[in-house]
Image (cartoon, grey):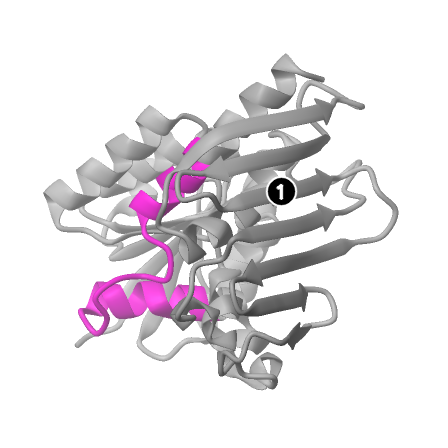
């Protein structure tokens, strides 16, 4: 098979990560970078031997795959444009800002026979640990995701859509049951979006999920406590360590695996494998990303109603 021709929308932090991944992979040719800032896009393109674009139509010409790493408000429109041109799409989270838009992307990809993946790359950590193959469903999950992002990246959306959506996706990956009841409180410090959210979600099978998220904290705290009928898994995402008294055969050296060392790279590689037909699916599908978005928006609505 000839090299896949790849492009990246967005020359910011995450766009740079994706562009470097494509440029480093065998079987992939990084063709173009699209960014509204010609200087920023040009600098990244020059560094990696690609061409800089400011026009979407010209950028998409001849591409096989594209990563959308633009601001979240542009995800749906740009992903839709690429899918309509027959290009496989990896879109950073959140997949869209509206569930109807996310579902439209899923339908468009299915109708065109294209791969639609989303950048919830922390699934690679669970895969490396072996948690995705755990023989039980959790009865409770307690997640903490607190950072000091202000002023910084991702503030065009709430902390729920920028940060906590990872935890919603991980919880949904561990439990196929539907979220039934949502309670939340939140705080806006800098506006116009929520900067802190505490969410409580009851699933239809009785599992309870709590997520404590903030981008107003000092330092970074990212942890998850997963309670199973047989015991507890306590995971520290920052230290890349966990304790486990469940009896499940989880890998204590997961951080040394390829997935554990480079979750983003694992997610991109899974996307490309699905595009080539070497894998049945990407790490996180568009449909799964739409479910995570739906839960994130339900939490956000509840938090705004009860500050």
The residue pinned by badge 1 equals: 210
Nearer to us in this view, 22 or 283: 283
Q: Residue at x 44, y 57 (%)?
A: 174
Q: Residue 232, how many percent across, how many down?
A: 61, 66
Give residue 167's position: percent from left, percent from top.
56, 49
Q: Residue furthest right?
A: 218
Q: For residue 103, which quarter of the picture?
A: top left
Quadrant the C terminus occupies = top right
Q: Indicate the quadrant where residue 217 lies.
A: top right
On whether residue 285 falls in the magenta region, the answer is yes
The N terminus sits in image quarter: bottom left
Identified at 63% across, 22% down, the residue is: 303
- Residue 262 horizontal/vertical position (percent): 55, 72
Looking at this rendering, what residue extends furthest in the top direction?
Answer: 305
**Residue 195 belongs to the span the image colors magenta:** no
Give percent across and percent down for residue 140.
Answer: 56, 51
Q: Is residue 85 visible?
A: no
As displayed, is residue 123 above or below residue 162?
below
* Position of residue 176 in the picture relative to residue 247 (left or right): left
What secondary structure is marked by label 1? strand
Residue at left offset 78%, top offset 23%: 190
For the magenta stretch, what is the residue range?
A: 266-294
Side of 88 relative to 210 (left or right): left
Q: Residue at 62%, 76% (x, y): give it.
A: 245
292 to the left or right of 142: left
- Asked if 105 appears above or below 129 in the picture, the reply is above
The image shows residue 161, relative to residue 193, as above or below, that is: below
Categorize mark 1 by other alpha carbons within 10 Å: few (<14), some (14-19), many (20+).
many
In this orientation, does residue 24 appear? yes
């Amino acid at each position: 098979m000839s090299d896949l021709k790849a492009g990246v929308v967005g020359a910011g932090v995450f766009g740079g990560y994706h562009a470097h991944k494509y440029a480093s992979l065998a079987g992939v040719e990084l063709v173009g970078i699209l960014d509204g800032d010609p200087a920023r896009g040009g600098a990244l393109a020059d560094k990696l031997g690609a061409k800089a674009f400011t026009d979407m139509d010209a950028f998409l010409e001849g591409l096989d795959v594209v990563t959308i790493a633009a601001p979240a408000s542009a995800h749906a429109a740009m992903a839709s444009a690429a899918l309509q041109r027959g290009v496989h799409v990896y879109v950073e989270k959140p997949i869209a800002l509206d569930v109807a838009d996310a579902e439209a992307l899923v339908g468009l990809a299915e109708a065109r026979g294209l791969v639609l993946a989303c950048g919830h790359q922390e699934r690679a950590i669970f895969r490396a640990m072996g948690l995705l193959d755990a023989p039980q469903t959790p009865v409770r999950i307690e997640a903490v995701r607190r950072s000091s992002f202000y002023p910084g990246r991702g503030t065009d959306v709430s902390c729920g859509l920028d940060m906590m959506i990872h935890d919603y996706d991980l919880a949904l990956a561990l439990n196929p049951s539907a979220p039934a009841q949502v309670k939340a409180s939140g705080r806006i410090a800098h506006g116009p979006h929520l900067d802190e959210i505490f969410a409580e979600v009851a699933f239809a099978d009785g599992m309870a999920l709590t997520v404590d998220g903030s981008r107003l904290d000092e330092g970074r705290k990212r942890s998850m406590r997963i309670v199973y009928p047989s015991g507890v898994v306590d995971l520290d995402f920052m230290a890349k360590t966990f304790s486990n008294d469940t009896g499940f055969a989880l890998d204590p050296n997961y951080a040394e695996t390829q997935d554990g060392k480079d979750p983003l790279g694992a997610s991109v590689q899974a996307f490309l494998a699905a595009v080539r037909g070497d894998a049945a699916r990407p790490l996180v599908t568009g449909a799964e990303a739409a479910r995570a978005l739906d839960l994130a928006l339900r939490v956000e609505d509840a938090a705004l109603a009860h500050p």
